[in-house]
Amino acid sequence: MKRIYCTYFDSRYLAQGIVMLRSLLRHDPAASIQVLAFDPDCERILRATFAASICVTGAAAFHAAHPALAALRDSRSQWAFYATHKPVFIRSILDAAPDGTLLTFIDADMWIFSDPTPVFAELESASIGLSPHRFSKAHQRHAIYGLYNAGWMHWRADSVARRCAAEWELDCFDWCEATASRGRFMNQAYLNSWPARYPGIAVLRHPGVNLAPWNLERHRLRRNSGRVLVDDQPLISFHYSGLTRHPAGPWHSLYPQPRRFNQVREAIYKPYLDAVESERLRLPDCGAGATDAVRSWTTRPNHTEVYSPSSV
């Protein structure tokens, strides 16, 4: 069974995106990877960094092939416009892929800790695999943003997945905004209805997939022989959502942190942000310009410092 991975980001997320791609290739060296680069700097640097190991599509070429998507640019915020690309990008890959190909979308702010093969085994013959948020009690209020996380999704190239992607595209063309409204939120809350709307939906159960600030409290973490285990299963991917970099260097999380956070900081945040900071130091030599985190910095009482780059 052929596996394809895909993601998208712009030059402001270059360091994070490159680090994610390197981690994916480290744990799945035979991976076929497609990246949609949202600006020319991102496209150029990705091509120079990865040469032939990934397939990079620039936004200009993608918009020329999808004029209905391009026409939405002026009517949406930048982040809403970016989010509208997800179903279009996924559908374009599914339409071109041989039947049975398994496509996995991974957000750029993730890191792969171990071989993802156990997830593919769990999917069996499912047409679509969804990753539940698994909100902890402290984060239940975030359920208005969707029961499933659109940052880690699986699609099998078959009639059900292709129909779902095409209909998701129409949904997002109709409405895709960064506010929770009438059961909708960006491209993500549409996923709530899919298990009832389409056959062959698998809801992932592996605790090591899409571990994130909003579900950490639900799981037991420990280290064993250099590996991070989640409920005694290998950590496969962590979602570093809500990270922002202070102009002076430290990284903060917008999410309240769990008990025993020092363990999480050392096992999960530090190795990832070591890699991101090292990549940031390399990028100016490639002409990348500013590569700070995409979120503007504001001071809030509940921000938690998770990392300082002074030791890199």
Image: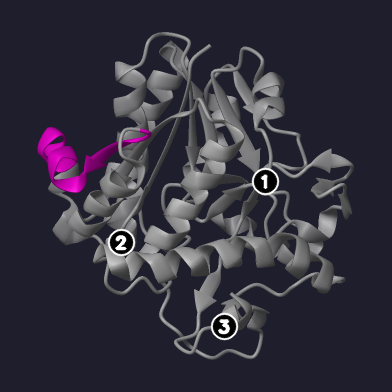
Crowd band around label 3 with a 10 angstrom C-alpha radius: few (<14), some (14–19), many (20+): some
* Element carrying mark 2: helix
Which badge, 2 or 1, comes first in the chain's sequence?
2
Q: Left or right: where does residue 37 sit relative to residue 125?
A: left
Q: Left or right: where does residue 104 sit relative to residue 42?
A: right
User: Where is 27 relative to 48, above or below?
Assistant: above
Q: CA distance from mark 2 to mark 1?
A: 24 Å
Q: Which residue is mark 3?
A: 250
Q: Which residue is mark 2?
A: 11
Q: Position of residue 193 (x, y in %)?
A: 54, 35
Amino acid on which disc 1 is placed: Phe
Q: Is residue 45 visible?
A: yes
Q: CA distance from mark 2 to mark 3?
A: 20 Å
Crowd band around label 2 with a 10 angstrom C-alpha radius: few (<14), some (14–19), many (20+): many
Q: Which residue is mark 1?
A: 113
Which badge, 1 or 3, comes first in the chain's sequence?
1
Residue 144: which quarter of the image?
Answer: bottom right
Residues drawn in magenta: 53-68
Amino acid on which disc 3 is placed: Pro
Q: Is residue 150 visible?
A: no
Q: Please tell me which residue is depicted at 12% across the width and 48% down the height of the picture.
A: 71
Q: Position of residue 294 (x, y in %)?
A: 39, 70
Which badge, 2 or 3, comes first in the chain's sequence?
2
Q: Please tell me which residue is depicted at 59% across the width and 60% down the height of the picture.
A: 240
